[in-house]
Amino acid sequence: MILWQGVLILLGMFAVTFGVRFVLFARADKVVMPTFIEKALKFVPVAVLTAIITPMILMPNQQVDFTLSNPWLLGALAAFVVGIWRQQQLLTILVGVLVFFVAKYGISL
């Protein structure tokens, strides 16, 4: 009995999720957005990622930490510099992670 309830719950969740998305995607080609909104929406991923990452970088222990002993800040600064300098996403990520781990665990290279 419990197995069937679980299956029915999963099927119901699938139907609701699929239904909502199908309706939105089926009508997507008929919706025309103004150009200024389309331009503004291109900045949404960057803004959301910044809002998620900034507290983690600046407040790793629930306190603001701008010191050089903050590995999150060092990794972020290194990634920022490499990102501005080289404009290569993979290199930026690798340098940021490498600097973070070296600062956090004192790995000698």
Image (cartoon, rainbow, N blue to C red):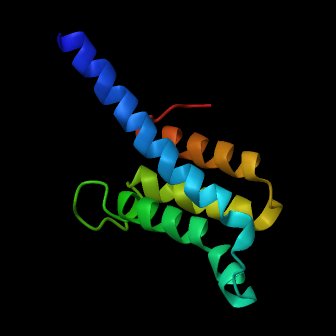
- Residue 31 vertical placement versus 24 (above, below): below
Q: Quadrant of residue 79?
A: bottom right
Does the image show residue 63? yes
Rendered location of residue 65, percent (x, y): 32, 65
| Residue sitting nearer the eye, 80 or 37 | 37
Residue 96 point in image, percent of width and height = 60, 49
State left or right for residue 8 relative to residue 23.
left
Picture residue at 74% right of the left edge, 45% below the top: 90
Picture mark count: 0
Q: Which image quarter holds the N terminus?
A: top left
Residue 61 % position (x, y): 24, 54
Residue extending furthest left? Answer: 1
Q: Is residue 103 visible?
A: no
- Quadrant where the C terminus sits is top right
104 w.r.t. 31: above or below? above
Q: Residue at x 43, y 50 (%)?
A: 71
Within the image, what quadrant is residue 3 found in? top left
In the rendered image of this protein, does residue 53 appear above or below residue 95? below
In front of the other: 69 or 24:
24
- Residue 99 lies left or right of residue 14; in this view the side is right
* Residue found 35% across the figure and 27% down from its top: 10
